[in-house]
Image (cartoon, rainbow, N blue to C red):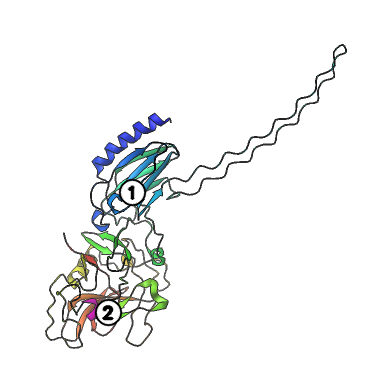
Amino acid sequence: MNTRQMNLMFAGALAASAALGLCACDDETTGVSGSQTMSVLDAGKTLGGCSKDNAGEIIYVTDSSAVYFCAEGKWQTLNGKDGKDGENGKDGSNGKDGANGKDGVNGVDGKDGTDGKNGENGSSGLSTKDTVVIRDTVVVVKRDTIVIKEPFSSNSNSSSSSCATSLVGKANWAYLNPSICYGDITDERDGQVYKTVKIGDQVWMAENLNFEYKVDGKTYGTYAVDSLKDYGSYYNWAAAMDSAGVFSANGKGCGKDIDEVCSPVYPVRGVCPEGWHVPNTTEWENLYNTVSDSDAALLAVGFSHWPNATDTYGFSALPAGMVASGTTGFGFGRYTYFWTASRKDEMLAYRRRLERDSMDFSDKIYYFSVRCIKDSE
């Protein structure tokens, strides 16, 4: 395929991408705004900058036949570089001519040249698969051909998904379901990046919150266990609800040992990033209705005490257990608790325990994990 053919193909792909509206597998989970474009870059020109402003942009470079897309602040390549050509074998020496008069003696045949070495394999690109998904669009990558196909299903929780989400960058991303098309958000308060997943009509964080809750510069109600750092932080209910009103007033005053004046206003942002909140019991029940009341479908795979886990929807709950004040953890590897934003009475609040499909309540002084849910549009 020559350069003109490639340019024509990409011109068609550009029109297709405009019609498809390249966006995130769940556009609202990435924070990427505006339309992404595909373009052809002539030989000798540079890619230019990659930032949030052009995240998702796809560029074909004619002089290297390489395809790049902008993600996580840098240009990523979809195909590995070509291996170097093997060296040519040297020609054998010609035999000498016979002398005139008498028949010349045949020259001795030159030896065959040594075969050139094989070229090295090109380094791996973004994925070893021929098919990857960039934003909502299936991109089929083969040697010198790129085909833009129909939009990927917006229901990103399908276990049959071919989405090749990058799970490199954080240790706990190794626990996520590689067949799920995750989005991501950045918590602007501390720069931490979290994977997100759409399940039914809800968008959840796909990992536990790890923000250090501080009031006037002092850590308050947050328990971080060094040996469990890949599992996020643990919060008492006061910290989970942002009872000091650092980020919003919706949970202010909640979480004291006895909080007679606590009246949560939903949604309660609590300790979550802006645009997200601590789910209440109703939102947890809605999640369970979506997954047919199956704990197994929400549990990360690979833990001995969770033999039936399937993580079908990419929620990827980890057996983080809980922390009681003054201890280093309890129940790690066996179960996990998540705080809700729902209050039972002056001393108790509701929690969700996974692996037993139960909603019960607890004293607010204990430390559990927090999963944030995205605010409704």
- Rounded to the nearest angstrom, the CA distance separating label 2 from label 1 is 40 Å
Find residue 101 and report its horizontal and vertical position in percent. Answer: 87, 11
Q: Please indicate whether residue 165 sits to the left or right of residue 188 in the image.
A: right
Residue 237 belongs to the span the image colors magenta: yes
Quadrant location of the C terminus? Answer: bottom left
Of residues 34 and 126, the one nearer the viewer is 34
Of residues 116 and 199, the one nearer the viewer is 116
Vertically, is 176 above or below 160? below
Give the crowd class for mark 1: few <14, some 14-19, many >=20 residues within 10 Å: many
User: Residue 175: in sight, yes or no?
Assistant: yes
- The residue where tag 2 is placed is 217
Query: Which residue is depicted at the point 26% across and 54% down?
Result: 32
Q: Quadrant of residue 120?
A: top right
| Amino acid type, callout 1 | Ile
Vertically, is 241 above or below 45? below
Residue range of the region highlighted in magenta in the rendering: 235-242
Q: Please indicate whether residue 372 sits to the left or right of residue 64 in the image.
A: left
Q: Which of marks 2 and 1 is in front?
A: 2
Q: What element carries label 1?
A: strand
- The residue where tag 1 is placed is 134
User: Residue 162: in sight, yes or no?
Assistant: no
Vertically, is 79 above or below 287? above
Q: What element carries label 2?
A: loop
Give the mark nearer the N terminus: 2 vs 1: 1
Residue 178 belongs to the span the image colors magenta: no
Query: Which residue is depicted at the point 25% across and 51% down?
Result: 154
| Amino acid type, callout 2 | Gly
Find residue 186 and report its horizontal and vertical position in percent. Answer: 29, 62
Q: Are marks 2 and 1 in contact (CB under 8 Å)?
A: no
Vertically, is 38 above or below 107? below
Q: Please indicate whether residue 180 sits to the left or right of residue 350 in the image.
A: right
Of residues 168 and 130, the one nearer the viewer is 168
